[in-house]
Image (cartoon, helix red, strand yellow):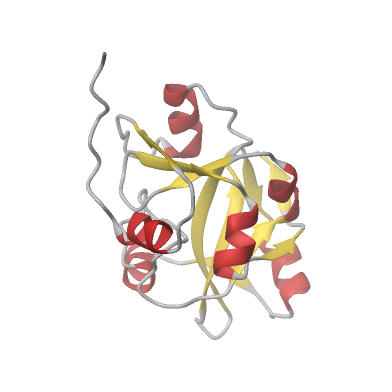
Amino acid sequence: MAKKAHVSETPATALLKARAIEFTEHPYEYLEHGGAQHSAQVLGLDPFAVVKTLIMQDEKALPLVVLMHGNRTVSTKNLARQIGRKSVEPCKPEVANRHSGYLVGGTSPFGTRKTMPVFMEESILLLPRIWLNGGKRGYLVGIAPQVCVDLLGAQPVSCALEE
């Protein structure tokens, strides 16, 4: 019987365990700038079901989290319009790291340093299961998408663009 790879606990997994949320662990070989497409390929997952955690900011530099399919990009104009902001743009990596407490490439929406509003592409909620970052590079957790709404108050939006 193969021994399961041990993954150190992260703020994200600590939160999931504390709330008794069922999740599966999926470590993989991290590739710089590989993104969700790489993790999906390595783990044999559909990139549509691998969800990226993006740290963005509005025109006042207030941070927010966007959960998006791994093979889609965010229409920042559509997102801003739907959430009542003048504009939305991705944070610079060092700013995203400060807001989330995670390194870009390992950002989880769970257990972030700052509490930020979370917006989620609405079609993610139609999936039976999603895989998103567990709080470190090279590590995804599999969960039911409704957990993002129940635990994070994620608000559904429609802002996906095909890559």
Q: Position of residue 152 (x, y in %)?
A: 55, 68
Q: Residue at x 40, y 35 (%)?
A: 34
Nearest the eye: 43 or 17? 17
Please state if 9 lies on the left or on the right of 110 as rendered. left
Question: Where, by quadrant of the figure, is residue 10 drawn?
Answer: bottom left
Q: How many marks?
A: 0
x and y percent of residue 111 in the render? 39, 66
Q: Decide which of 60, 23 is in the foreground and name it.
A: 23
Q: In the rendered view, would you say 136 is above or below 131?
A: below
Q: Is residue 45 above or below residue 144?
A: above
- Please state, as top left, top right, bottom left or bottom right, where the C terminus lies in the image: top right
Name the residue rendered at 30%, 57% in the picture: 103
Q: Quarter of the image containing the N terminus?
A: top left
Q: Is residue 80 left or right of residue 68?
A: right
Which residue extends farthest top? 1
Q: Along the horizontal axis of the image, is 21 left or right of 34?
A: right
- Taking the spot 75% from the left edge, 63% from the top edge, the residue there is 78
Look at 48% across and 54% down and name the residue there: 21
Is the residue 35 above or below the residue 43 in the image?
Answer: below
Q: Position of residue 51 (x, y in %)?
A: 55, 45
Q: Where is residue 52 drawn, in percent x and y?
A: 52, 48
